[in-house]
Amino acid sequence: MGLWLFAVAVLVFAMVILGGTTRLTNSGLSITEWKPIRGALPPLSPAEWAAEFRNYQRIPQYQLINRGMSLEAFKGIYWWEWAHRLLGRIVGAAFAVPFLVFLFRRMIPPGLVGRCWLLLGLGGLQGLVGWWMVASGLAGRVEVAPERLTVHLGLALVVFCLLVWTGLDAWHGPARPTHRPRWPLMAGLLAGGVFFQILLGGLVAGNRAGLVYNDWPLMNGHLFPRDYWQGGFWRSALHSQAAVQLHHRLGAYVLFLAAWTIAILARRSVWLPTPAKSLALALAALVTVQALLGIGTLMMGDPLAMAVVHQATAALVLAVAVGLAWRARRP
């Protein structure tokens, strides 16, 4: 079970990266229909390609941004979105089929059965949320709504974290009862901080806020961006490029300080096991690398390759943070 859950977690990790790439290449609206079964096959004839292209030509993104795009250029963005959806189907099958086999053969420990059912349900919900996100960009907008993109990303990360945690439980077995001082809470809060910081990054990506304020540590020469406020709290927090980038920067500073504080405290702890100390140090180092990648990506104007690496490293940081939170609970 542990190997199976870790393998699915790797697939979800790849799904997050591919989804980010789909967003960065502006490919997410190239498929304008949701066909859970028939959509597994791409267009197989010139007539089918022409029909898909006609569907795309009806939405605002084509009419206002990509008018005049050739069929070959359309195929370039279509394949990214199709691959993203195909990988989603593969992830679903890779979880559901072994789960039902394990369940039928009574190979799943009783304490993990409910969690696996939850994972199966969240996977199905993720497909619905993905279409809900895409639908927001098919009329009245040229891109998907940033808040829906962030919900889609957040649910994927919840599934990823639950897979890693459940995989660790399956691999190591149940924990022995033990006194648990403040470390599990501290490690859990740090993992929650990493999760929240990635959501703030989702809002940055959704608003394409990495294309503005490309200096650091100031923002166009100011500590506080002048166009932060957009006429309302939620409008600013979700749709202001200045606001979402500032929040992501501030979150990074807090996370950097918290990660290194916990790493230093873990090093000095007499209770924390050695594997947890090593994980705390590795997490602080990864957070540092991630911060440097974020600064570099911003100052270079959000190039595709660096942005993809930045997103992949974020998911890796989250996996290590979840591993530290899990390890801190063990005697």
Image (cartoon, rainbow, N blue to C red):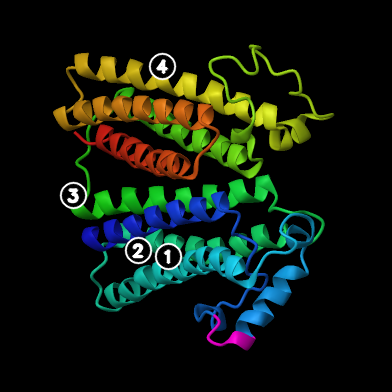
Looking at numbered disc 2 in the image, what kind of residue is underneath it?
Val
- Cβ–Cβ under 8 Å for marks 1 and 4: no
Looking at numbered disc 3 in the image, what kind of residue is underneath it?
His
Q: Name the chief secondary structure element in magenta.
A: loop
Residue 108 against residue 222 in the figure, above or below? below
Marked residue nearer the N-terminal end (2 or 4) = 2
Marked residue nearer the N-terminal end (1 or 4) = 1
Residue 67 image offset from top left, x and y in percent: 75, 61
- Residue at the extreme right of the image, as rendered: 231
The residue that disc 1 covers is: 117
Mark 3 vs mark 2, CA separation in Å: 16 Å
Tag 3 secondary structure:
helix
Q: Which mark is residue 113?
A: 2
- Cβ–Cβ under 8 Å for marks 1 and 2: yes
Looking at numbered disc 1 in the image, what kind of residue is underneath it?
Trp
Marked residue nearer the N-terminal end (3 or 1) = 1
Mark 3 vs mark 1, CA separation in Å: 20 Å
| Badge 3: residue crowd in 10 Å (few <14, some 14–19, many ≥20) | few
Residue 48 image offset from top left, x and y in percent: 62, 85
Marked residue nearer the N-terminal end (3 or 2) = 2
The residue that disc 3 covers is: 172
| Badge 4: residue crowd in 10 Å (few <14, some 14–19, many ≥20) | some
Front-lying residue, 296 or 92: 296
At horizontal 27% and vertical 27% (from top left) the residue drawn is 280
